[in-house]
Image: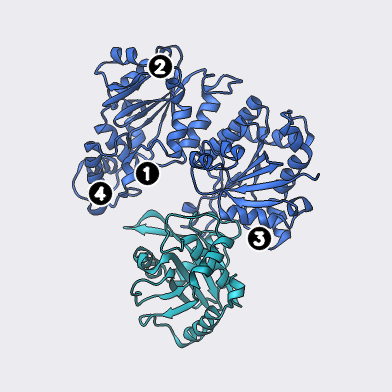
Chain colours: A blue, B cyan
Amino acid sequence: MPDTYQVWCDKPSDKTLVEAFRRLSPFWADVSSIQVIPNSGPRALASNFFDRQVVSLLEYDRPDIIILLDGHPVLVIEITEHGYTGDNPLQRFARVVRAAELGVPLVHFTPFARTRFDEMLYTDSPTSARRVSSRLFEGFVKLTETYKVPIVAMDWPVTPRGTPVKPDLQNSTQLREIFGELVDYAQHICEHDGARLIAGENVLNCEVIKSAVQATKQKAQQTNVLDSEIRLQNIPYDKICRIIANPKVMVELLGQDYFMKGKDHKLIALRAIEDSLIELVETQTGPVNAPSNVEELRRILPQEFSEKPWLIFYSGYEWRGQPNGGIVTNTDILYCRTPTGATVKDRTQYLAVVWPRVFYKSNNPRRSVLLEELSDFANSNGPCRLGDLVKQKRNLRGQVFGHPNYIAYRTKSIGAWSENSTVARIYRHFCDLIILNDRVLLGDHWKTVL
Amino acid sequence: MIGYYLETIGKQFCEEPKDGNLMDGITETEVHALLRTRLTSIPNAGLLGWNPPNGKTYGLPNILIPKVVDNHRAGSDRVDACVCYKHLLMLVEIKPASSKMDDDADKLRRICSSYKLEGVVQILQRQGLCPSPSFRWLVPVLAFGILDSALPSDFLCWQAYPGLYRQAKGVRLSEGANDELEEFRVSFENIPDNLLK
């Protein structure tokens, strides 16, 4: 009986692309079905008896393309034209981790270097291409070594202006010029290694795979021209407790200068920190009123927390899934796991996230006040504390006080936590502590200890 | 008939049951699919860019127009579609229903008044696109699936199904432009149903 290949896609546009691949080889032409995954979360899909193995791959986030051989996933493909440096390339990392955890190879297809739209739109002169942060490739290498499954990257070619080349999907020559390496690799994995993967064999000894893994390792060794804006710090547990007791400590930790340069929306986060007050702390037995002193805090949180160093990730972003979720998973895999650590319990150091622009309780009165202030300021430049911060920044930088950039009113600018969201699922799974504006949450793996 | 038709098209082009903009049975994704099929069937019409509801497209670039407020960069506007036909460059915003297009109309007004034809062409070229230097007219278009409101007077309006094309009274272009628009209208309204199916 011939092998049967099926493809599940995240979006209709992914499906359109895979359908175009049918022109490129008999293998792709013979794929028995190409379908779009219904637009529901993994739990809803599972309760509707959707393919169990596909649902498992969606646990953290939805990958773009999943190829199944006789009903078993044998390859995941991520395709994104958004390369860039800093936080953005990491935003799909949770999906990558999930594929690795389940032993499914993955290809991440993206421009390794491309120009930014927000720069090229303003000039006719050439703008410099931004290289994808090596942290992405380092993460792939770590996953390959940890889970013994190939997680590799491939380059999406760019135009002379530095934007990704987009083919006429009806033109096989153009399609092959851009996606040729990807479709050939996918075909090889399916035909040559698919059965071995299903049998649970290690396929890293395959020459084609070895070559792709080696190329990814080389990318991981590159030096980044621009350092990422991702804010990570190694700190002792005592300092974590001090931040919970007094969130303004976070400003000292980052330094006032961090907020006073770059985009103005950093000041929204600074304003949120100024008003932050932890009201409840989740413990292994449930939430309790936040104690006023560090000693009491240490007593109610898991005792193991004092046994290892901590890595803290400060997120100044508004309430949104990406890149937050991807950064956290990449940070966990690269910096917090033991060399072969396959689970979040295999830690060399604990991971905490500080996210001051998000409240646990959507109806917290302090959130309403901050939103009202933001609305007034964004819409009418009205006098307020946020306006004072913008003025202070302008004075420090010798600039005239004018219209603030990147400050707009949206309810998610000062967001509210939702346990059903992708980012909440990811944070709960990968972090040990999540410090919101009004509450401290415990990672799921600490709650299930009981 | 329309319900049956949309159901058929919906199954063919969109397997997502909803995309958050469901209006009386037609989604934004479905309107995009209908319109794209219609436009690609028009002789001499070309698509320079397309921005589907989920923002992801492999065959065509997304079109971005920089937004400047008080001489400061303030991000960029995405235009749903950029269509060329002879000397016409059409910027198109798409929604399930005409009543939901106020913000889109404001966006297109802002772009057209800020940049004019020359500025838009320059921005497209900066994105690596090479639109024909022979464009003479920039035309803003509102496109929708359901007509459920009065239409603004300063836009061309397209209804994806049935293929209705309306040139509002306030749209004043030169005689040459009107000739080309009339040719375009005839093609737009006469795409046979079997092509769309």
Disc 3: CA contacts within 10 A as few (<14), some (14-19) or many (>=20):
some
Q: CA distance from mark 3 to mark 1?
A: 38 Å
For image coordinates 53% across by 78% down, the residue present is B188
- Mark nearest the camera among 2 and 4 is 4
Q: Amino acid at mark 4?
A: Ser
Q: Residue furthest right?
A: A1
Q: Earlier in the sequence, mark 2 or mark 4?
A: 2
- Mark nearest the camera among 1 and 2 is 2
Q: Earlier in the sequence, mark 4 or mark 1?
A: 1
For image coordinates 63% across by 25% down, the residue present is A146
In the image: residue B101, left or right of residue A378: right
Q: CA distance from mark 2 to mark 3?
A: 54 Å
Q: Secondary structure at mark 3?
A: loop
In the image: residue A1, left or right of residue A33: right
Name the residue carrying label 3.
Answer: A169
Q: Is there CB contact under 8 Å for labels 1 and 2?
A: no
Name the residue carrying label 2.
Answer: A236
Disc 4: CA contacts within 10 A as few (<14), some (14-19) or many (>=20):
some
- Mark nearest the camera among 2 and 3 is 3
Name the residue carrying label 4.
Answer: A375
- Mark nearest the camera among 3 and 4 is 3
Q: Give the position of the N terminus of chain A as an image quadrant.
A: top right
Q: Amino acid at mark 2?
A: Pro
Q: Nearer the viewer, residue A397 or B156?
A: B156
Q: CA distance from mark 1 to mark 2?
A: 30 Å
